[in-house]
Image (spheres, helix red, strand yellow):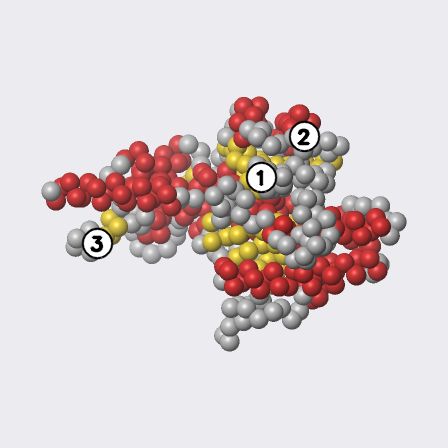
């Protein structure tokens, strides 16, 4: 984060060298990741760092294999500047989505390209059953890469929430069993020898859409995520909002019908009991249709199955007021629908929600849609999981910058004194 000297000129924060070096590396990597290839002067301008600081950081990142030289830009007079870009072979991250009935695994390079992907069903979803599958799937994904896989920089693991909430965790078919008080980050990290970031699936899905999908140009949005249950990812100023305990966005357990249907959390009348994939599966089961997989659900929708049509109308009736509520609470640029619903079914659900109730989003000069579809489909949570270590490694953190700002202010105060 740049500051201004007493003369008004921009200067970088350098009062705590170790803290600021880590922060400034993140700044430089993030600038090159988003805008590269770039020369040192352009990096300096976008990062608000001195050219000398950028030159030193860039050389470090090249030595670490995270940036590569891509040649010289042929423009203007004098010696053309050397361009730098993120090294796609400098490292990769793994994204693991642990769902109630399957595990999806992705390997993504630091340029954001998916290099391998796998999905396997789960018979059991407790830690003793899941951890060996995670190890086997990451190793199998790495074995798919030719030549050998780049270094594994980190692993993002996502699963349904809520986390560690008495009476609401590990209950019912939309959640995982046996994970209450289980230190997943430590156990998985020790097993694989890499840093692990744990996140709920809806928040990770919002990260996936932000980096790879429909929300690339959005900094403030909400994503209603259809897993087996129903979750909400919230992005504020380009960063995921998690809440005090990582449970922000449990929209599935908002009460929408007093004394209504029993939800897996034990309450009656939760939104998830009406507008989730699990709720649809229950309706189909009551009609004698075995819970379909994604392909079968897509087929039933194309055939116009009456249960799916009825669920669409009912779910839309409960979801539309929630969209207006989110707009009034967060004033997002858009609300995104995404996850495990086939695109055609998402289309019908969106249409059935129209017209949306009045909210602060109904501005006279608004040109964009209030409700948009995600583009990353069933892999959105796994994509977000793989992005989590990249965000940790490459995106500047506000708390680090603020701490550095405090250090500088204290030092300036001591100098004045």
- Say whether disc 3 or disc 1 marks the residue closer to the N-terminus: 3
| Location of residue 348 in the rendering, given as x and y in whole percent from the top left corner | 72, 63
- Say whether disc 3 or disc 2 marks the residue closer to the N-terminus: 3
Question: Residue at image x 57%, y 71%?
Answer: 358
Q: Is residue 336 left or right of residue 245?
A: right
Front position among marks 1 and 2: 1
Question: Residue at image x 67%, y 30%?
Answer: 126
Instruction: Reply above or below: 238 against 127.
Output: below
| Location of residue 220 in the rendering, given as x and y in whole percent from the top left corner | 49, 57
Quadrant in the rendering for residue 337: bottom right
**Location of mark 1 (residue):** 165
Q: Is residue 317 left or right of residue 88?
A: right
- Give the distance between the C-alpha atoms of the residues marked 1 and 2, in whole angstroms: 17 Å
**Location of mark 2 (residue):** 126
| Location of residue 29 in the rendering, given as x and y in whole percent from the top left corner | 41, 43
Q: Secondary structure beneath disc 1?
A: loop
Q: Mark 1: few, some, or many residues within 10 Å (few <14, many ≥20)?
A: few
Q: Kindly tell me whether residue 268 is visible in this rendering.
A: yes
Instruction: Reply above or below: 116 against 222.
Output: above
**Location of mark 3 (residue):** 9
Q: Residue furthest right?
A: 288
């Amino acid at each position: 984060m740049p500051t201004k000297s007493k003369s008004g000129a921009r200067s970088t924060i350098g009062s705590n060298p170790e803290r600021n070096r880590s922060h400034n590396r993140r700044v430089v990597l993030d600038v090159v990741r988003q805008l590269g290839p770039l020369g040192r002067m352009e990096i300096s301008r976008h990062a608000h760092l001195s050219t000398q600081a950028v030159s030193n950081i860039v050389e470090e990142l090249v030595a670490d294999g995270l940036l590569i030289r891509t040649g010289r830009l042929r423009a203007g007079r004098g010696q053309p500047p050397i361009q730098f870009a993120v090294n796609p072979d400098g490292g990769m991250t793994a994204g693991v989505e642990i769902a109630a009935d399957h595990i999806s695994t992705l390997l993504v390079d630091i340029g954001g390209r998916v290099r391998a992907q796998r999905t396997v069903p789960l018979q059991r979803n407790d830690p003793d059953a899941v951890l060996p599958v995670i190890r086997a799937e990451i190793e199998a994904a790495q074995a798919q890469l030719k030549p050998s896989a780049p270094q594994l920089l980190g692993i993002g693991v996502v699963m349904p929430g809520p986390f560690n909430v008495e009476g609401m965790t590990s209950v019912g078919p939309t959640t995982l069993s046996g994970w209450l008080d289980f230190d997943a980050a430590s156990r998985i990290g020790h097993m694989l020898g890499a840093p692990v970031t744990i996140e709920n699936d809806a928040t990770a899905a919002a990260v996936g859409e932000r980096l790879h999908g429909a929300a690339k140009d959005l900094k403030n949005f909400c994503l209603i995520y259809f897993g087996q249950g129903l979750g909400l990812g919230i992005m504020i100023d380009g960063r995921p909002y998690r809440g005090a305990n990582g449970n922000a966005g449990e929209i599935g357990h908002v009460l929408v019908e007093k004394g209504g249907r029993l939800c897996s959390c034990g309450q009656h009348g939760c939104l998830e009991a009406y507008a989730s994939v699990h709720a649809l599966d229950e309706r189909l089961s009551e009609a004698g249709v075995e819970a379909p997989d994604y392909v079968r659900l897509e087929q039933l929708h194309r055939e116009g199955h009456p249960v799916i049509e009825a669920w669409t109308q009912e779910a839309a009736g409960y979801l539309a007021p929630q969209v207006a509520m989110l707009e009034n609470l967060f004033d997002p640029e858009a609300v995104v629908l995404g996850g495990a619903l086939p695109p055609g079914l998402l289309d019908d659900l969106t249409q059935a929600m129209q017209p949306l109730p009045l909210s602060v989003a109904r501005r006279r000069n608004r040109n964009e849609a209030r409700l948009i579809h995600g583009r990353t489909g069933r892999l959105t949570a796994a994509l977000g999981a793989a992005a989590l270590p990249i965000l940790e490694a490459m995106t500047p953190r506000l708390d680090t910058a603020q701490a550095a700002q405090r250090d500088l202010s204290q030092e300036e105060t001591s100098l004045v004194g």
